[in-house]
Amino acid sequence: GKAMNYGEWKAEKNDSIYLRKLIRYDVDSVLLYARTPEQFKDGLEEIGYVVNLSGKHWTLKHPQSKRTFRFYKLTRDNRYDEEHLMERINSNFLFPMQSSVKDVIPCKEYQGNHRKLKGIKAMYIRYCFELGILRPKGIPQKYPSPALRKDLIYMEKITDENTFVGKHNLESIEDVLAFKLDLNNQIENWMNQRRSIYNKIKRTRDPELKQQLEQDRDTLTSKIAHGKKEIRICEDIEKRVPDIEEKL
C-alpha cells in the first residue's frame, strides 16, 4: 500500500499529535452521538470545521489548516469512508453512546505546585491543563472544550513556550521584552566577534591557530543560532499571551 507520511510516522513513533490524528479524534467524538448525517456535520462545524457531505466523497477542513481532507483518506484502511461513517451513524439509533474515544494527546502529569506560580508562568500552566497537555497529579485527563480544541495543533510550540517562561523566570510580557532586548544585544556582540574571527582566519598562516579560530567561530555560530531560536520563542509568546488571556 501507500507509504505513511514521514512526519506522521515520526509523530506516531514519538507518541505525539499531528493534524490527521487530531481530526480523527474529533470525528470519533462527534460520531459518539450523531444519529443523522446532518447532526454529524453540525457537530463538526461547532468545533470549527468546514464540512461538505455532498458529492461523491465527503470532505472536511480543520480550522487551523489550509488543506481539505477527504474522510476516507484519514486512514489507509478506509475506516472513515462514507459507507463506514454511515454504519456508525445508523448504529447510534440502536446503541447510542456505547463506545468511548481513546485519548490521543500525549499528556504529562504535572509534579509542581502551580498555585505558587505568578503572571504568565501561571497562565501557561493553566492553559496546558485546559488543553490536556498537562494534568494535575492524581486527576484523570480530560479532553479540551471545542473553543480550545483547535489550538492543539500548536501543542509543541505551546509546550516550548511554557518551558521557556519557567526556565527564565518570566512572569510578564515586560519580562519577555526585556529578555529579548538583552538577547538581541548579545547576538549582535557574538556576530561582531565572529566577524573578527573570520578576518583573522583569512590572514593567519599558522595551521594550529587557524584550527582554534575555526572552533571559536563554530561555537559562536551555535550560540547565535540558539539565540535566534529563543528570540522566535519570545515573539511567539508576545503574540500568544493576549489570545490565551482572552480564551481563559
Image (cartoon, rainbow, N blue to C red):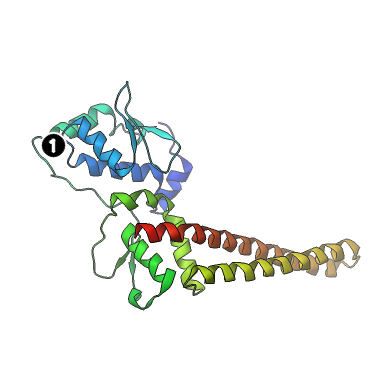
Task: Measuring from the top left, give residue 135's x and y in whole percent.
Answer: 30, 65
Q: Residue at x 62, y 64 (%)?
A: 227
- Describe residue 142's horizontal placement relative to residue 49 as left or right: left
The total number of labels drawn is: 1
Task: Residue lying at the far top in this picture: please name it.
Answer: 56
Give residue 156's quadrant in the image.
bottom left
Amino acid type, mark 1:
Asn
Report the front residue among 35 and 122: 122
199 with respect to 123 (left or right): right
Q: Residue at x 52, y 73 (%)?
A: 168
Task: Specify the farthest residue to the left.
Answer: 94
Dot 1 falls on a residue whose secondary structure is loop
Residue 35: which quarter of the image?
A: top left
Residue at (34% x, 39% y) in the render: 49
Provide the residue designation for mark 1.
92
Mark 1 is surrounded, within 10 Å at the Cα level, by few (under 14), some (14 to 19) or many (20 or more) other residues, namely some
> Between 5 and 110, which is closer to the camera in this rendering?
110
Q: Is residue 86 left or right of residue 134?
A: left
Q: Quadrant of the N terminus?
A: top left
